[in-house]
Image (tube, rainbow, N blue to C red):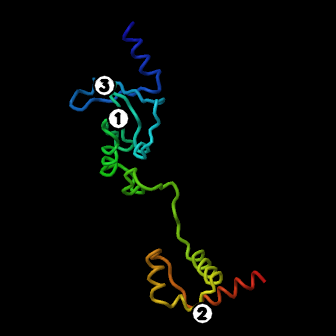
Amino acid sequence: MESQNEENSVSSSSSTLPVPIEGESQRSSQIIEFTESEKRKLKSKSWRHFKPASVNGVRYGICNYCNARIKANRKCGTSSMSEHFRRCPNKPRNLGNDSGSGGDDSSQHYFDQDVSRKELAHAIILHEYPPSIVDHVGFRKFVASLQPLFKMVSRNTIKNDILRIFDNLK
């Protein structure tokens, strides 16, 4: 009866998951309770790639990609999780080397040649730069350092863009 209650508690609870211990037989497993309500919020960006879990009262992070257990109690910190994510063999390729630390990567940036060309024309109009600025070597190097994909236009092309903007506003 007691073993039946244990089986029911494992299968009925959505917050428990049997995970085999390495080096032991497949039959023995250890119950991992996912901690859903914490006293303190998990603030590190590393937690985006790990699920919080508790094994025998010790907090671990379970990798979302390879199910590796990384110790993550308050004394250990999250640097080991960040290092694992950097080396994780199963992480998606589009995540790159984002270790979970540093800047916010929530927005992606896309390059559009036409939008950039229109903004260049607006800047020339706004600041009354000469259209020949696009021929200056220093300006070309500066733009190339910002966005190497931008194909610089000639002064005649930018002049035509400026006249087109003027006609639209007129």
- Residue furthest to the left: 23
For label 2, the residue is 156
Quadrant of residue 79 in the image? Answer: top left
Circle 2 packing at 10 Å, graded few (<14), some (14-19), many (20+), is few
For label 1, the residue is 74
| Residue drawn at 31 percent across, 46 percent down | 84
Q: Is residue 35 above or below residue 169?
A: above
Q: Is residue 158 above or below residue 47?
A: below
**Going from the N terminus, do you reach mark 2 or mark 3 first?**
3
> Quadrant location of the C terminus?
bottom right
For label 3, the residue is 29
| Residue drawn at 54 percent across, 86 percent down | 153
Give the residue type that dot 1 points to.
Answer: Arg
Looking at the image, how many numbered discs can be counted on the residues?
Answer: 3
Q: CA distance from mark 1 to mark 2?
A: 63 Å
Q: Is residue 165 above or below residue 27?
A: below
> Quadrant location of the N terminus?
top left
